[in-house]
Amino acid sequence: MAGAFGFKGCQKIRGPQIRNLLEAKDFFLFDCDGVIWHGEKAISGAAKVVNSLIRQGKNVVFVTNNCTRPRENYVHKFYRLGFTDVMLEQIFSSSYCSALYLRDVVKVRGQVFVIGCDGLRRELQEAGIPCVEEVDDPDATIYDCALAPDVKAVLVGHDDKLTFLKLAKASCYLRDPDCLFLATDNDPWHPLSGGRILPGSGSLTAALEVASGRKATVIGKPSRFMFECISSQFRGVDPAQCLMVGDRLETDMLFGSNCGLDTMLTLTGVSQIEEAQEYRNSELTTNHSLVPDYVVDTIADFLPAFEELDEQSN
């Protein structure tokens, strides 16, 4: 579809070009952090854009690698920030998709050892997947702690209470070649205010990959599995009719490329247009999968297009 508009290759679009894109697409996939909101503050105009798309009959879903909260908490956050039309079934987090993978794809029979927050555990429990309970003495070490006998998978997500003992236990479980090694996502870090960063799930996964000598299967973006989850729950999803909107080249744009979707980079988050242009001009063809089809300053740039469409309908 990008070629049809004649400006594929991370060029900015506005006005009539955005309007044509909105008319051409039926399915919109949005990342959350850096696209829809920053922390507890919605990006200006984002709620109106999302609500307008939904009310116009467009399919809208949210694909986030943030695995720290269950989907029901996301619904509350959306509503609190003014996204009043968002429903539970529109939210696809890496924690929810990890639960679907364990339950429906590999059909795990046994316990899952989780390195992650309570939100990840809650998604697994709601899917009926038993998790290993942490009942160690505070002074326990890998030399004397108990190891569960029936661990069939290790799942790594964001864990702000990661300990050396958790890492060591996971390494022991993964010595069994039949024990699955999964990661919610491979995001290396997340931006914080004041120029600080928060290590992401990918950094924890990398440590365990080194310790275990194994590579994790990644569930979240840029893996195709998230899109497969969406396709299984929404009928007739045609990749050619989809637009993936995100702020990170290495996850959102690559995810869209992997799934055959048109992609749009919004400049309210991590990646900037200069990085996209470097990838576009790279001699490495693999870098071209990181290049967005379209670029906007913010998804609020959609708003004038909505006004034009409303004028046409009147």
Image (spheres, grey):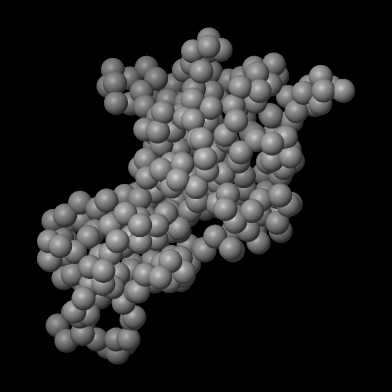
Res 149 quadrant in image: bottom left
Measured as percent of width and height from the top left, residue 158 is found at 40, 61
Q: Is residue 98 above or below residue 159?
A: above
Measured as percent of width and height from the top left, residue 116 is found at 38, 66
Query: Is 210 placed left or right of 279 in the picture?
Result: left
**Residue 159 in view, yes or no:** no
Quadrant placement of the C terminus: top right
Query: Is 277 placed left or right of 46 in the picture?
Result: left
Query: Is 25 placed left or right of 174 in the picture?
Result: right
Res 81 quadrant in image: bottom right
Q: Residue at x 16, y 70 (%)?
A: 172
Query: Is 96 placed left or right of 297 in the picture?
Result: left
Measured as percent of width and height from the top left, residue 24 is found at 61, 22
Measured as percent of width and height from the top left, residue 63 is found at 50, 46
Q: Is residue 217 above or below residue 155?
A: above
Q: Residue at x 49, y 25 (%)?
A: 240
Q: Is residue 116 above or below residue 64?
A: below
**Residue 228 in view, yes or no:** yes
Q: Residue at x 37, y 40 (%)?
A: 224
